[in-house]
Amino acid sequence: MSTPQEPPSSTGTEPGTGTGATAPSVDAGARPTARPRVGNARWGIAVLLFFGVLINYFDRTNISVAAGPMGKEFGLTPGELGLVLSSFLWSYTLAQIPAGLLLDKIGMKSVLRVTTWVWAAACFLTAMASGTGLVLASRILLGLGEAAVFPGAMKVTGYWFPRAERGLSTAVFDSGQRLSNVIGTPLVALAVVYLGWRGAFWTTGILSVVFAVVFWIRYRNPKEALRSGRLSADEYDHIRSGGAQDEDVVQPNPLANLGYVLRRRKVWGLSLGLACAGYTTWLLLTWLPGYLQTALHMSVLKSGFYTAIPWLVAVVVEFLIPGWLVDHLIKRGRRETVVRKTVLIAGMVIALGIAGAAFTTSVPVALFWITVGTVGITLAYCVSNSLPALIAPEGSVGAVASVMNFVNTMFGLAAPIVTGFLVQATGSFAPAFLVAGVIMAAGIFFYTVVLGPIEQIPAPTHA
């Protein structure tokens, strides 16, 4: 099938464009560089998604900072603490595919209007927990509430942004998970120090309620925003003519569509590649503060601020490379597949540096290698998170994104458990970092050999 990003062969057959002609190729160098200003309503949507992901990750990672004092109160071993840290991912993983099918059927607006209140309630329940069982139950509820956020954000960028702006728009919302460690980890650490570990969950629960209200008021799909005057006709044409997916395309049989998606090799290459990066991501999200506190002998407050350093560097790199540079090169006529896959593979190679932390007890050296690994993971993650909206058949972004997130979180679920028991068995974090390096190397294979070209999968009726 010809694809919008390859200039020589586009034929105007992409379903759902609503124009009867091919979306302009982002590889074609002949398009004029000077365009009239078309408005910035779409970037307001990107910022809204950013705050959703940011607060989402406050809720996910607050337990990693509070784990020390909470573990002492409940008398948890490192292995038991690993189970508690991973409990969010149990339900989050199982809910991924149902959430994706629901997103494809009824849309992001309706789904997130309900689930934001669920995850806020989960934070409040954790703050009130009187034992390990209640903490586990509230974290499982949090996983159910937050399952639709990332597939939904990917689906929304497919609606709201032309293909040549997917790098930056994805970097905007994806940076929320990095900045949660820059802003949220020190914030939660302060809450733990001054309010106790329960205060950290009250704080993030209140922030979740605020976002729930703002999202309810502000989010609309592009056609709805156009009708209400929130989106100009010029900006809407800019979005649609640039290859955005049609929000009105709905798969009549979500389960059959899921089966079709699951048979695509491209989906598995993307999913397994991201899962290898996801393993190390969740190792860091759940265990980095604990590593700094136990192996490098930092206080809770100091570990919160040191945890922010690798993620702050990663956010800067994310906006510069998979955000600005990728879009810039594609607009200048570089082939989309070459640009995106180069950054993707380079990120995975750089991420192998995480293994360097296994060979040192020096704080500066350990932070250097952790920062290198975090930057590499971020490059791979940002590009990967832009791909479901680029490769999915019309109306199937939710399904592709949920399969990708399901496989990703299966690996992520294992990371805190494996790390906890490795630390318990060896008394060291070194084996955990070495395992992460091996898994990252496997990810390079999936991205290079299995994924293939970055092009849209044909719809089931055209397969």
Image (spheres, helix red, strand yellow):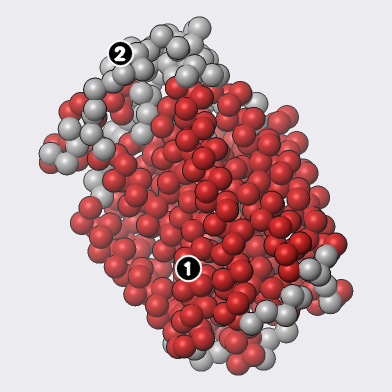
Q: Is residue 418 left or right of residue 199?
A: right
Q: Kindly identify the amino acid type of the residue bearing the numbered disc 2.
A: Gly
Is 244 situated left or right of 60 in this image? left
Could you tell me residue 300's position as x and y percent?
60, 81
Say whether residue 248 is visible: yes
Of pointers 1 and 2, the one earlier in the residue sequence? 2
Q: Is residue 210 left or right of residue 182?
A: left
Which residue is at the front of the view, 363 or 196?
A: 363
Which residue matches tag 2? 20
From this view, report whether residue 54 is shown above or below residue 425.
Answer: above
Of residues 257 and 283, which is closer to you in this image?
283
For the point 24% across and 27% down, the residue is: 37
Q: Nearer the viewer, mark 1 or mark 2?
A: 1
Give, as a three-letter code, the residue at label 1: Gly
Q: Secondary structure at mark 2?
A: loop
Q: Are marks 1 and 2 in contact (CB under 8 Å)?
A: no
Q: Give x and y (percent) for residue 159.
A: 34, 36
State the image quarter where residue 213 is shown.
bottom left
Please determine whether, in this image, residue 245 is positioned above or below residue 241.
below
The residue tagged 1 is 184
Instruction: Give the CA distance from mark 1 to mark 2.
Output: 47 Å
Toward the viewer: 463 or 50? 50
